[in-house]
Amino acid sequence: MFSDRSNRFLALWFPHLPTDRLKRENPGRGHTDQHLIVVDKLANTLRLTAVDERAAKAGLYKGMALTDARAQFEKLDIAFASPRKDAALLEKLADWCDRYTPLVALDEPHGLILDMTGCIHLFGDETLLIKDIHKGLHQHGMIVRSAIATNAATAHALACHSPGGIVSETDQTRRVRALPLHSLEIEEGHLAGLKRAGLRSVGDVEVLPRAALTARFGTQLVNRLDALFGLASEPISPRRIIPVCMVERRMAEPLIAMESVEHVLLSLSDELFRHLQQRVEGAREIEASFFRADGDVRRISIQTGRPIAETKTLFRLLKERLSTLSDPLEAGYGFDIIRLAAVRVERSQAIQKSLDNRAQETEEINTLVDRLSIRLGNTRVLRPVPVDTHIPERAISLEPAAKAMRNATLEWAPVAHPGNPPERPIRLFDPPERIDATFEVPDAAPAQFVWRRVQHTVVMAEGPERIAPEWWREHAGALTRDYYRLEDNTGKRFWVFREGLHERGNPSPRWYLHGLFA
């Protein structure tokens, strides 16, 4: 067998995925004397897009016209293609395969690629791994063909266009050369050209000069040859984020009682945080995965506003999350794998304690934010975050409170000196409210104004604070604003602005009230 240092990719190909899906939805379909076929309209003709295993042995094939199939067989079980349902089943199968490796990629339309590098020893060897995967998939009604090779492209070709199996590095080149031409998966025109030249296998093409192949068929053919023979790497795109740290428990018997599930979660939390403490890190996002014996997978994500490294804190948040699920977590036939993964981590820091040995108020607020975010959702617990702009209504944005402000370079509005009033109000009107202002000098502060049918006489004014429009964002007609802080004869304070300037040809600029000072 191979050492874990060598790259090993497992390709799973489901040759009858659409018909397997139909049999899963209606088990009675697989026990009749009718051949199950899937059809779709291609070029104004109904053609077969998938056939079950028995129909394939009888001579039916993909691309065959439905009229020809009916001429040969009287009894046909015909279903129309549903690519959306096929894709959903493939996603579900990918979820099931997450139990073997976190690096699972879709190989559409009917395949999966698993990067098993460093994981094979967990299942004994490659033979036992393949046996376990085939057994599980067959129990779920899926017909599968698999191949293990040193790169993803080779594993895919061997699984789709050959009997598959475990391919050693020394035997891989021979197996690839024996593949048929259509395993190159190139354009039909180029494939026909190779056949006209008398070529029958990948090996026949591989011995030809690359320059001549590129000149005649373009770079696609050469790139495919390089990928199949391992001369070029085609990385896979895993469906899920690779966790920083992961722990799991595989059960000898599926767990059904939720008390036992909680006990396993406690044990996994202790183990996870031991690993993180060795790295001097805390978890910002933790995902709990529950693999059911019937193939379903449930995932619960916990996001926190600060790095956590305590089992007690995580377990409290997990219980809070489980109690607020719209679709409760049900064991069904039981959980055979439970996994905890730290998806996002940060460097942990010691928390300053107060003199009476109690946590600071900020720690209590962070805990409250975490619990509210878990119960209500991250998008419903928000906090203001400063934005680098001079436009007042854009100076603040709302972001999830659980999202930490790392490496913040922006500051809030300048803090007023002790004894001086603030320069801007805390709350603004959105949008600013129109006022009717009366002024003695065109570019001066108003002497009085009417807001909401009430007249206010100005006794004190400060300003102006001129703010120009952001030319890279505003439309061409955006105007300059002059802001004033006003106080009326009753002691109320207002923040108003004039939109437009008299000196720039605007005879009657408009006035707006943008906020009130407390």
Image (spheres, grey):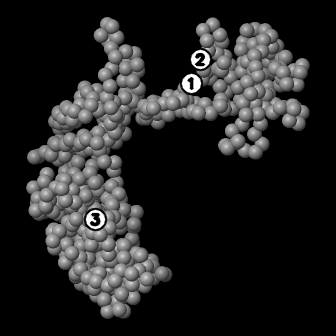
Residue 211 as seen in the image, left or right of residue 442: left
Q: Which residue is mark 2?
A: 415
- C-alpha span from label 1 to label 3: 51 Å
Residue 391 as seen in the image, left or right of residue 215: right
Residue located at (19% from left, 51% from top): 293
As shown in the figure, which amino acid type bears the numbered disc 1?
Trp
Residue nearest the observer in this picture, 44 or 29: 44
Mark 2 residue element: loop
Q: Indicate the position of residue 378 as horizontal and vertical percent values.
A: 43, 35
Q: Which residue is mark 3?
A: 152
Residue 199 vs 408, above or below: the answer is: below
Kindly identify which numbered label has been placed on residue 7: none
Residue 433 as seen in the image, left or right of residue 145: right
Q: Indicate the position of residue 514 as horizontal and vertical percent values.
A: 70, 26
Residue 199 vs 464, above or below: the answer is: below
- Crowd class of label 1 (few under 14; some 14 to 19; many from 20; radius 10 Å): few
Q: Indicate the position of residue 45 as horizontal and vertical percent values.
A: 45, 82
Quadrant in which the C terminus is drawn: top right
Is residue 215 visible in the rendered image? The answer is yes
- C-alpha span from label 2 to label 3: 59 Å
Tags 2 and 1 touching, CB below 8 Å: yes
Quadrant in which the N terminus is drawn: bottom left
Residue located at (83% from left, 32% from top): 501
- Crowd class of label 3 (few under 14; some 14 to 19; many from 20; radius 10 Å): many
- C-alpha span from label 2 to label 1: 8 Å
As shown in the figure, which amino acid type bears the numbered disc 3?
Ala
First in sequence: mark 1 vs mark 3? 3
Kindly identify which numbered label has been placed on residue 412: 1
Is residue 323 visible in the rendered image? The answer is no
Tags 2 and 3 touching, CB below 8 Å: no
How many marks on residues? 3
Q: Indicate the position of residue 44 as horizontal and vertical percent values.
A: 49, 81
